[in-house]
Amino acid sequence: MSKTMAVSFCGMEMKNPITTASGTFNPQAHSQFFDLNRLGAVTVKGVAKEPWPGNPTPRIAETYGGMLNSVGLMNPGIDAFIKDDLEFLKQFDTKVIVNTAGRTLEDYVEVSRRLAETEVDLVELNISCPNVKEGGVTFGTDAHMVEKVVRAVKKNTRQPLIVKLSPNVTDIVEIARAAESAGADALSLINTLLGMRIDVYKRKPVLAQKVGGFSGPAVKPVAVRMVYQVHKACSIPILAMGGIYTGEDAAEFIMAGATMVATGTANLIEPDAPVRVLDELEAFMEKTGVQDINEIRGIIE
Amino acid sequence: MWNDGVAIKEQVELAPGIYRMELFAPELVAQAKPGQFVNLYCRDKSRLLPRPISICDAIVETGRLVLIYAVVGKGTEELSAMGEGDTIRVMGPLGNGFPLEAATEAKEIFLVGGGLGMPPMLFLAKALSDKPLKIFLGFRSQPWMGQEFEPWGEVMGSSDDGTYGCKGTVIDAMNLYLQHADLAARRVLYACGPIPMMRAIQQWQQGQNLETWFSLEERMGCGFGACAGCPAKLRMPDGSVIQKGVCKLGPVFPGEDVIFS
């Protein structure tokens, strides 16, 4: 059942539309479970110009059909990232997308400049992490701020720039349009929804930070709706994520308008989820008579 | 490294809310080392995250994996309702386990288990049974484990209310033992238990010729080093503080380095 899985994304040929959502994929940990060469791209965890310690624990809580995390973009900093993860990824024939984090506009610019000197294929600007007090989502929920940050970062980024959007806004289309007009080459959505859980026996929040990012299969309908709306309003390609667990889930996002799709929380539960979803997507195409994955993109009116 | 259909061979309730599960997992058992853990997954897909459970015993001859755990929520409640004939998804062994080589030079080895930190100490006791082992087990009250340790070393119990061993904590039991022991002798101590116990050991160890290794527990996301959900804070010799993931780089760390929040 040889199907055409290749897609073009930001002028780049991807062998298939499957990648990993940032923060849920660790190249070395996941390479024990599946062949990274099989993915169209891998997206690695948010990296900042210097190491970030992240938030206090507990950082993780389970919720019905999903989870909350308040990791807070813990990362080893751009230098360690280039030396370790990027070096490790060189052996694989897959595109590398690097998610970037910052507290200030200058932080993002600095990371982009550093990445410009590397072989990284695409940069994903994370202006949507709900778990950090400065930067992150504070840049991503105001259309003017989005425009300002994207414009500045775009100028300093060699690679195509994907802007990752927060669902924690009243009008996702307004934010998407702001990013597009400021020069974004693509959009990725959704980042996590802000959520909270309370332990009623201890009478306190489960997470040390009280609130955290909600992800997993439970958030999928919200993500599908947002991808659909953004696809209708913008012309740049979309990398979609939000609760993808099966090949059918991936097809759903592609029909809503996504060019690429990422598995996120699923990678933490079933480490080989990205390749399973890829196989299931191909099986879905076989079952429904789709020869080329590009046939079904954005078919929902 | 993971298997969707591991057969449950036996499940018994040792005490209210504390269960002992035996699984048939020969490949996993062959690789397992003391101090490692496994992820158990619920069938109910509304509960996605794995339940990390320490390995209590891995019996190569029979391929049996022994786990002892407490019901603390809906997930472990689901696990406790399973029995012989059921199958379960298991990933592991995970983590690095206890450094056994640390025991080679020691004159005496202390194994300290408190409450639900006790099960992994059994696997460790068996692995170090050719060494002079002193095993300290601390309970709140009635013991639900203890005899299993007797073939492997000298067992000294303690309980908060005095129903098992000496009245007090594992610290009291260790002090009692040391009254008649050579204090200068080189000792290595491996411990797993609640944070107040580990913190007490850390304070108690100061000034002693003692090397400690603590197995830590933290709320985990994935269990295999991908989500950055379970960092331990460690103090380095130069005073700096670093973080290491409990699941992938632990769960065992040098006791004096651990910073308890």
Image (spheres, coloured by chain):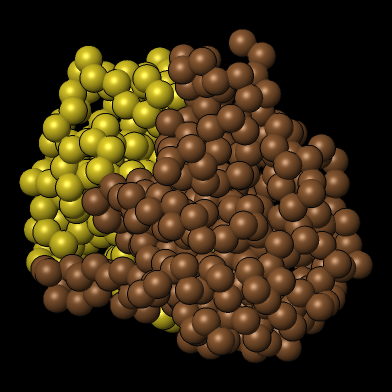
* Res. B249 in view: no
Spot occupied by residue A136 in the image (x, y as percentages of width and height) = 55, 79
Which quadrant would the N terminus of chain B be assigned to in this image?
top right
Q: Is residue A115 above or below residue B137?
A: below
Residue at the image point whose x is 46% and y is 14% from the top: A287
Q: Is residue A201 left or right of residue B257?
A: left
Residue farthest along the right direction in this orientation: A117
User: In terms of depth relative to the viewer, which is nearer, A91 or B174?
Assistant: A91
Residue at the image point whose x is 33% and y is 50% from the top: A221
Chain A tint as drawn: brown
* Res. A30 in view: yes
Looking at the colours in the rendered structure, which chain would you say is drawn in yellow?
B
Q: Is residue B54 left or right of residue B45?
A: right
Q: Is residue A203 left or right of residue B119?
A: left
Q: Is residue A151 left or right of residue B170?
A: right
Residue at the image point whose x is 71% and y is 47% from the top: A9
Spot occupied by residue A31 in the image (x, y as percentages of width and height) = 67, 39
Residue at the image point whose x is 44% and y is 68% from the top: A172
Spot occupied by residue A230 in the image (x, y as percentages of width and height) = 49, 59
Which quadrant would the C terminus of chain B be assigned to in this image?
bottom left
